[in-house]
Image (cartoon, grey):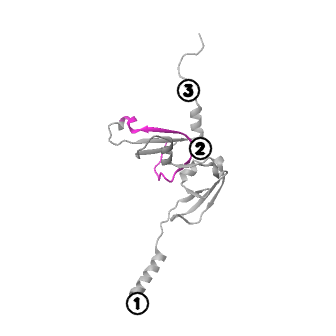
Amino acid sequence: MKPFLTSVILSITSLFFGQANKSNEAAYLLDYKLVSQKTISYISPDEIDSVNVKKNDTIINNKHFSGVLYVTTKNRDKFDFLNLEQIKNDFTSIKKSDVVYMINGDFIKEDLKAILLDRNYILKVEVTNSNDFYNLRESNTKFDIINILGKTKENLDAKNNIILRGHEAIGVK
């Protein structure tokens, strides 16, 4: 009887005094789908219908969040989300896994599967090999850098900008 009572007391105290992994980060739900904060930052503000914030502690997929940010879009069916690995397969001919990702010039350091980009957001995908860098040519480590340029105002302006070079006047004698 004594071992039984001891195990019951231990299990009850572990339930009441056990500590859960609490984080101070919020969950981001885009049209009720859990996404990363980076994914939300690549959605155009014109596409967002409403934003609601709940400050209650929430558990989603066995992960504790200190609050939830609900983002609903105007047209849910408009988005065709791809993760970074799918973008690599669809937009490049790279088959190896030694890849560094960038979005609009910013290196991606967090979970690659958590970041989703809309296929319609992608303006251009640039690939640079480590051999293109003078300092890395002699290195044994070979990798590719994939820079995904989105349809931001800056990128669209740079794409539409035409630069004329030369010092001679055209059509003047």
Name the residue that disc number 2 marks.
120
Judging by the rendered image, the residue that carries numbered circle 3 is 163
- Counting residues from the start of the chain, the first of labels 3 and 1 encountered is 1
Label 3, label 1: how many angstroms apart (C-alpha)? 88 Å
Tell me the SS state at disc 3. loop
For the residue pair 138 and 13, the one nearer the viewer reads as: 138
Q: Quadrant of the N terminus?
A: bottom left
Q: Which residue is mark 1?
A: 1
Is 161 above or below relative to 59? Answer: above
N-terminal label among 2 and 1:
1
Q: Nearer the viewer, mark 3 or mark 1?
A: 1
State which quadrant residue 150 falls in: top right
Mark 3 or 2, nearer chain start: 2
Looking at the image, is mark 3 or mark 2 nearer the viewer?
2
Q: Is 53 inside the magenta-drawn segment?
A: no
Instruction: Give the residue type at disc 3.
Output: Ile
Question: Within 10 angstroms of label 1, few (less than 14), some, or many (20 or more) residues?
Answer: few
Residue range of the region highlighted in magenta in the rendering: 105-134
Residue at the image point whose x is 47% and y is 76% from the top: 15
Residue 125: where, in percent of width, then height? 51, 39
Cα separation, mark 3 vs mark 2, equals 27 Å
Q: Amino acid at mark 2?
A: Asn
Residue at image location 44% in from the left, 83% down from the top: 8
